[in-house]
Amino acid sequence: VGESALVEQPAAAAGVYVLLVDAGANGADVTLLNDHAAAAARSLRLVTRPVRLWFLVPPGAKDFGVVLDSPAPEENAKVTVFDPDGKPVAEGFTGAQKRVIVTTKVGAGQDGKAWSIATDKAPTGVMEDYTVSLDERLPAYWSVAPDRLVVSR
């Protein structure tokens, strides 16, 4: 608790590698230093901090949803969805309800590109535990920058 550790693992060969972090009932703050690192998960359970994350909206998508859960009404969060140009296009927050689904329309020419979300404090309550989840129709990968998307071949 309160200490950090650097994990260095050279890649033995080209390919995809997975780092699994299991903090049990505790929180773990993981900073990925690899230029091509991404989180392979449909849902991310996060604690206290706002985040900005990117994901791929595949070609042909017309709309999608992002789900935000928190133990409302005490612990709340807000999520804003940004289009590929960085323009905020939808938002929602917990508070009166423990779960919100933010549905977003995909405009012409916006499919097949990197979209993003930003989380932040909601208008009420404290920002502690919260979970963001991608729609089942989206690839289950989050990246820390738009040029680091995981794209299947």
Image: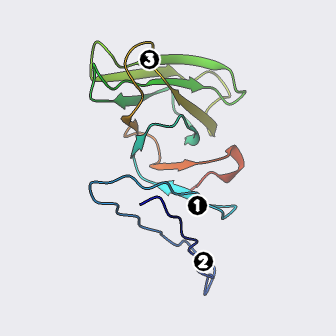
Q: Quadrant of the N terminus?
A: bottom left
Q: Nearer the viewer, residue 118 or 3?
A: 3
Label 2 secondary element: loop
Label 1 secondary element: loop
The answer to the question of whether label 3 and label 1 lie on touching residues, with beta carbons closer than 8 A, is no
Q: Earlier in the sequence, mark 1 or mark 2?
A: 2
- Residue 63, image x and y in percent? 48, 25
- Residue 25, image x and y in percent? 26, 54
Residue under numbered circle 2? 8
Using the image, tell me which numbered label, if any, was put on residue 153. 1
As drawn, the residue found furthest toward the front would be 2
Q: Residues within 10 Å of mark 2 (few under 14, many from 20)?
A: few
Q: Earlier in the sequence, mark 2 or mark 3?
A: 2
Which label sits in the foreground, 3 or 1?
3
Residue under numbered circle 3? 92
- Residue 72, image x and y in percent? 28, 23
Rendered residue at 61%/26% (across/down): 82
Q: Nearer the viewer, residue 107 or 69?
A: 69
Q: Quadrant of the C terminus?
A: bottom right
Q: Is residue 92 above or below residue 6?
A: above
**Cα distance in 3D space between marks 2 and 3:** 38 Å
